[in-house]
Image (cartoon, rainbow, N blue to C red):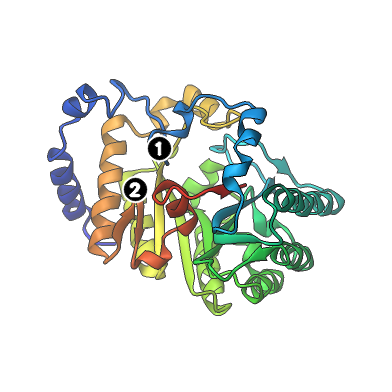
Amino acid sequence: MADPREWIEKADALLASVSYPELVEAGVLLPDDRWLPVITYPPITMYPPQEPETLLATAEEWRGDRPRALYAHIPFCRFCCHYCHWVKRINPSRDEVDRYADLLIREADVVRGWLGVEKLSASSILFGGGTPTLLDAAQLDSLLSRFLDRVDLSGCRQFSFEAEPASILGEQGAAKLAVLKSHGVDRISIGVQSFEDHVLRGMGRSHDGAEALASIEAVRRAGIPSVSIDLIYGCKDQTIEDWLRSLDTAVASGADAWQLYRLRIERHGDMQGKVLDQFRGGRDRFADLHTVRRMKALGVVRSMESGRQEHFTRIFATAQEHVTQYMWDYCCDLADVIP
């Protein structure tokens, strides 16, 4: 690892260029350590609730063949990460997964009828979770075959799939990746989170750093052209040196892009993760506000100096095509989204 003092100096110089009191006064930041993870502006959490009848009343405006961003959610995981605040089903039965896949296809048919189209025109597609790669190769092949029978890919700029590292390793993992590639998936986003084993254990992850690296290599071997990873800072027992090592490992891994997330302790979702109890039971094991900001600045300077530019908030990539097109469609191009 490069001398951490050099990177810390660069990060501190970046922090010194930012006036946090001015940002608080302008209303960009909250006056204390509370914060909202912002994906859109205004944040989705600021939108007023909508009744289903109101949404259905706008269906006529949606009719036609113009492309839309498509999102399919797979709410299944084989373990529960401590930082996860979302509804999920842990270790579902095979029958439960199959029934859910059938319902996804039925929903696609309902939307096609609602829009009055034979096929849904996609500008981008994202299968997220949960863990979409929890499904085995046969289940993925069945789901994607039926899904793509109902989708027009002629205008699709990216077909992205989320993955958990261990789920795409070994013979079974290779079979899954082969299925994804055969159906046109051209970007895999891997939930690496960290390359440091003790940090991963503190998150409740089941993979280790070596498996995280192996999963990136597995995507390359499968011939899928774009691989992105997620990394989290501010985790329990994570030091500045730990974070720098993960950043250095990410650079060395050859990943095309990564998203840098600050650990969310209080829920931003439907369920509170275990991390809040961990925090209340030992605040000294979590980074203070200054250290968290320094970690964010380190992520920026280390990523930029590796040749990756910030093409989107907190997303650093070697080129635009490796950035999540789905997020770009609905956040920047204000495309219609069909979840």
Task: Answer above or below: position of 105 versus 236.
Answer: below
Q: Tell which residue pokes out farthest to the right in this image.
A: 95
Task: Answer above or below: position of 39 versus 156.
Answer: above
> Which residue is under mark 2?
313
Quick one: quadrant of the N terminus? bottom left
Q: In the picture provided, is 335 more to the left or to the right than 63?
A: left
Indicate the amino acid at tag 2: Thr
> Which residue is under mark 1?
38
The answer to which image quadrant residue 121 occupies is bottom right
Indicate the amino acid at tag 1: Val
Q: How crowded is mark 1: few (under 14 residues within 10 Å), some or many (20 or more)?
A: few
Q: Where is residue 64 in the image (x, y as percent from the top left)?
A: 60, 55
Q: Residue 329 carries which label?
A: none
Q: In the picture provided, is 76 more to the left or to the right than 333?
A: right
Residue displayed at 37% across by 28% down: 35
Q: Where is residue 267 in the image (x, y as percent from the top left)?
A: 52, 29
Observer-nearest of 184 and 236: 184
Observer-nearest of 141 and 123: 123
Residue displayed at 53% across by 48% down: 336
Q: Do the residues labelled 2 and 1 touch (CB within 8 Å)?
A: yes
Q: Is mark 1 on a helix, strand or loop?
A: loop
Residue 225 visible? The answer is: yes
- CA distance for labels 2 and 1: 9 Å
The answer to which image quadrant residue 25 occupies is top left
Q: Position of residue 73 (x, y in %)?
A: 65, 49
